[in-house]
Image: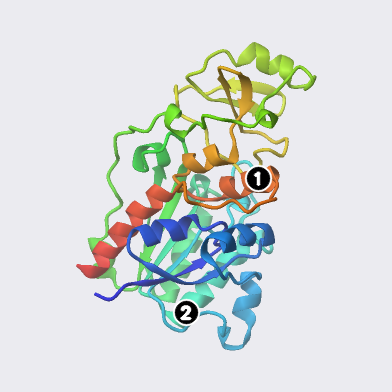
Amino acid sequence: MAQLKTIDLFAGIGGIRIGFENAGFETIYANDKDEKAALTYGANFGDIDVASLFDVVSERGMKRIPKKFDILTGGFPCQPFSVAGYKRGFADKGRGDLLFAVIEILKKRKPVAVFLENVKHLIHHDDERTYKRIEDEFRQAGYYIKGQVLNSMQFGNVPQARERIYIVAFRDPRKLMKFRFPDPLELTRKMSDILEKTVDPKYYYTPDDKFIYPKLKEAVKFRDRFYQYRRVYVRENSRKGTCPTLTASMGMGGHNVPIIRDLKGIRKLTPRECARLQGIPESFIFPEGMSDIHLYKQIGNSVSVPVVARVAENIRAALEA
């Protein structure tokens, strides 16, 4: 079979693209409206169409979307469906309703398969009516779907507790019957595998941080586990050596900022360490001069690459069967 071609929607910094290309796919189009994320994407992959997907779809004939491709991929905006947000779902204009732009593309271009990723709570949002609506929309567009929640530490061999729903759809129901989500893996990567040996002093907390340092000094006791700063208190992660879910609010004073203690003191994780927790390769480029605030957001918004790659391999196996 010829190399299968994908389009990369809500591309972010390219985590889904890396996973699919690791599984042997070729990416021929990418789109995201976040200009900062697009700079990071461009530094690693080249051209990306920076625009709202609604604008792309509304253009006459969707001329920016390739006419021929095999797989549509995307991690569509998760905030409208997350327990950490306002949970407005499809009513969140410009974010929650972007899935309908995806449906329009499916109706017009008819790729053989679809891969989507979102927060675990998507299944339960609005008393499960949201997920039922997604199933109905896909069925009306001619697709049969299957979804499963996978934890990155169980299915991607990365020490991050990150539960996400992965949705796979095929036009041919026989292909869906041949598709299986991957089996769990033994977690062999450890906390020590992701930590940098030399860390810039700016990542360390000092007594000058008068609001947070006393709380950290009291709570962050051990060097073999991750901690979270959750706005007003510090929480020790219950599983040794496993990081809590990385979020887009990391580094912006929000909750879930991962913190560790090392031989030099108490510090936050660096962007490179966070990238390793997502399975992003060492060769990945962070644009020179981009602030850590944007890098933390981009990495927290990204995906666990090894999980995506394993699902992509099974999609390819189902299509080639």
Q: Secondary structure at mark 2?
A: helix
Q: Is residue 294 left or right of residue 269?
A: right
Quadrant in the picture for residue 42? bottom right
The Cα–Cα distance between marks 2 and 1, rounded to whole angstroms, is 30 Å
Tell me the residue at 34%/72% (across/down).
4
Quadrant in the picture for residue 69? bottom left
Q: Which callout, 2 or 1, points at the residue further toward the start of the chain?
A: 1
Residue 116, visible in the rendered structure: no
Label 2 neighbourhood size at 10 Å, few (<14), some (14-19), many (20+)?
some
Q: Which residue is mark 2?
A: 107
Task: Give 171 or 46, whichever is nearer the viewer.
Answer: 46
Q: Which residue is mark 1?
A: 85
Q: Is residue 227 left or right of residue 293?
A: left
Image spot of residue 239 (x, y percent): 45, 23
Image spot of residue 31 (x, y percent): 57, 68
Question: Measured along the vertical axis of the image, is residue 22 above or below residue 69?
Answer: above
Q: Is residue 216 left or right of residue 263?
A: right
Question: What amino acid does circle 2 point to?
Answer: Lys
Image spot of residue 286 (x, y percent): 59, 51
